Amino acid sequence: MPKRARPVELWAAEHPVYVGAGSLAALGARLKQEPEGVRVFVLGDENTLRLCLPELLGQLDGLRNSSTIEVPSGEQSKSLETCRAVWEHLLTAEADRSAVLLNLGGGVVTDLGGFIAGAYKRGIRCLHVPTTLMGMCDAAIGGKSGIDLGGVKNAIGSFEPPMGVYVHVPFLRTLGKRELLNGVAEMIKHGLALDADHWNDVRTAPLHDMDALAGLILRSITLKAEVVTKDMHENGDRKKLNFGHTIGHALEAHSWESGQRTLLHGEAVALGMIAESWLSWKRGLLDRASMELISEHILPLYKPYPLMASDHHRIVALMRNDKKNREGGIRITLLKSIGEAVVDVEVTSTQLSEAIEHYRHLVAHNALHNRP
Ligand SMILES: NC(=O)c1ccc[n+]([C@@H]2O[C@H](COP(=O)([O-])OP(=O)(O)OC[C@H]3O[C@@H](n4cnc5c(N)ncnc54)[C@H](O)[C@@H]3O)[C@@H](O)[C@H]2O)c1
Ligand SMILES: [Zn+2]
């Protein structure tokens, strides 16, 4: 872990990301730059306001006169109803255009808060303080904000880079194992899509060790920042970061509507990466040994999501609604090798269905062999 805060240069100095021991001090210094009278609203959920806000208030004088806005924890809060409630809160509190929204939480809070800030009075400024591994290594980075609508993930959203992102790794101390693994999925994705060394590091790291985790977070942020700096609006290379997400988002949405156990975003992406690695191999892009290595590593990390053959049709239909599709065809990010993704590979519904079938078989096969 770096001794001092290390700003990662993302879109130059205007939108810095701080990772490391001095990141809260950097946030304090940033708040001190605000003129007298600027009001800060801290947006969080019941967990982050209870577990993380006290440390923030204890360290930062600049937050002494801030007010807090609480939203319920969980993906359901990425909704128009929650936006409305927060906008009304800001109006009632007479927040003007100079106000700052400080988003303290996981990906739900930063996705939601970014969107709320971007639209309130045609845009107020926001800061992100991510508190989950998912938030630190991915969701708070890159300026994408959004909410869900009609069961479609991130159906409404915008690109809203925050003024700064402040990553205080010790917040992860209170995070449960399931939530940690949820974030690990995105770090695996960064490795598989962009950097084979990172994949190896994530694969072999002791994830309970905060110092090891801090190093991996910094690397993931750097990888994502490099891509986003070149392609903010996702016309080219940024699509590499969607690896695992076409099938992953559909499985995530399926888990909400099917009454099955609800998948967390990272869990769904992990399963999506298994299926999409298989598709990469099937399409002659990825070698078989790499495909198997990916699958053998990811499969035991996450609880299996049992599917029935009759689910495939609906899951493929959900993919067609994915906002990443253009002109009718389904285009997807696949792997050419570990560490190198290819974007915009046109695939058919049948191929996607086969990839899901492959995952279904893996789960069924494993269940058979692991039976006591
Ligand atoms: N914008 C992007 O680029 C991007 C990238 C990846 C994911 N996302 C989005 O991020 C969301 C998922 O984010 P998430 O996994 O962080 O979920 P989350 O924000 O719901 O947090 C998960 C849970 O952990 C709790 N929590 C947060 N911090 C905690 C802490 N320090 N200690 C204990 N509990 C804590 C929360 O209250 C919540 O119950 C999804 O909606 C996904 O679409 C966005
Ligand atoms: Zn994701």
Image (spheres, rainbow, N blue to C red):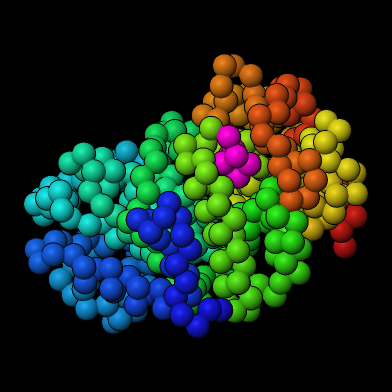
Q: Is residue 180 left or right of residue 84?
A: right
Would you place residue 258 above or below residue 362 in this image?
Answer: above
* Image coords of residue 53 (percent x, y): 32, 72
Q: Using the rendered view, name the quadrant where residue 191 is placed.
A: bottom right
Would you place residue 370 above or below residue 159 in this image?
Answer: below
Residue at position x 22%, y 60% in the image:
41
Seen from the viewer's position, the closer of residues 144 and 261 is 144
Q: Is residue 238 magenta?
A: yes
Quarter containing the C terminus: bottom right
Would you place residue 267 above or below residue 30 in this image?
Answer: above
Residue at position x 55%, y 38% in the image:
253
Q: Which residues are magenta?
A: 236-241
- Is most of the magenta stretch helix, strand or loop? helix
Residue at position x 41%, y 55% in the image:
12
Residue 319 in sight here = yes
* Image coords of residue 132 (percent x, y): 49, 64
